[in-house]
Image (cartoon, rainbow, N blue to C red):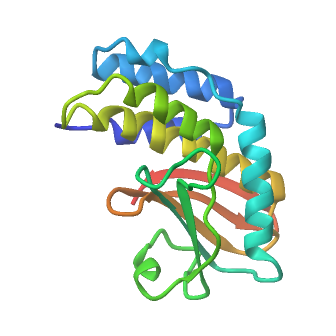
């Protein structure tokens, strides 16, 4: 079964309001897999999710200026108040001028995990449809990967790191992509498969 990863990455790459991007994810889902779930999933509070993720990223960096930031997604450890769905690993061995992920396998400094609340709520809504495998992965690749990318890119844009860094994100046990690149000039959305 082929998942529309390039379309999801392109959606994350867009600089449009988060609600518009989320609805684009619905359209991607509808185009590739017929199900009522695309309309049943509620629109998450992206502003609150971006603000909370920006605070988490600031705390994670503290005084560090990593050249590589790994943001790994986890659908299995989400729980209402104490769970997480994103882990962070920092590296000083990434070359932000190149789209390369080898550095994520060379020993990362891990920080505290984070729960994107709206992502958890979206997951709960589509998991209620109890799809069989491999169809159950469609909403993971569209909503979980896509919405997390929208939130995390928005959070990086909000804190505007002033150093050269490459942010990658995706499923910690599977598909990863390039999220954003930062420099003194600002934040560039990359939104590309790794």
Looking at the image, residue 57 lies above or below residue 15:
below
Q: Is residue 130 left or right of residue 2?
A: right
Looking at the image, residue 16 lies above or below residue 70:
above
Q: Is residue 135 left or right of residue 41?
A: left
**Residue 84 rendering spot, x and y as whole percentages:** 56, 56
* Residue sitting at x 25%, y 27%: 131
* Residue sitting at x 71%, y 46%: 154
**Residue 71 rendering spot, x and y as whole percentages:** 55, 63
**Residue 100 rendering spot, x and y as whole percentages:** 44, 73
Looking at the image, residue 91 lies above or below residue 81:
below
Residue 92, by quadrant, is: bottom right
* Residue sitting at x 52%, y 31%: 122
* Residue sitting at x 56%, y 55%: 83
**Residue 165 rendering spot, x and y as whole percentages:** 66, 72
Name the quarter where the N terminus is drawn. top left
Q: Is residue 100 left or right of residue 148?
A: left
The total number of labels drawn is 0
* Front one among 25 and 135: 135
* Front one among 111 and 15: 111
Looking at the image, residue 87 lies above or below residue 135:
below
Name the quarter where the C terminus is drawn. bottom left
Q: In this view, does 178 lie to the left or right of 174?
A: right
């Amino acid at each position: 079964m082929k998942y529309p990863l390039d379309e999801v990455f392109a959606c994350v790459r867009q600089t449009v309001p988060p609600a518009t991007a989320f609805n684009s994810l619905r359209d991607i889902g509808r185009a590739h897999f017929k199900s009522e779930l695309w309309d049943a999933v509620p629109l998450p509070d992206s502003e609150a999710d971006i603000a909370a993720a920006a605070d988490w990223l600031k705390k994670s960096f503290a005084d560090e200026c990593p050249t590589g930031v790994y943001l790994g997604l986890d659908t299995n450890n989400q729980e209402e108040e104490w769970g997480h769905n994103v882990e962070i690993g920092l590296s000083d061995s990434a070359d932000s001028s190149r789209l390369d992920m080898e550095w994520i396998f060379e020993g990362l400094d891990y920080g505290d995990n984070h729960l994107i609340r709206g992502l958890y709520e979206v997951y709960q809504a589509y998991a209620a449809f109890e799809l069989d495998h491999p169809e159950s992965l469609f909403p993971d690749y569209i909503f979980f990967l896509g919405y997390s990318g929208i939130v995390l890119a928005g959070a990086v844009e909000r804190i505007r790191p002033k150093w050269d860094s490459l942010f990658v994100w995706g499923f910690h046990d599977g598909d990863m992509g390039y999220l954003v690149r930062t420099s003194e000039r600002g934040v560039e959305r990359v939104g590309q498969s790794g």
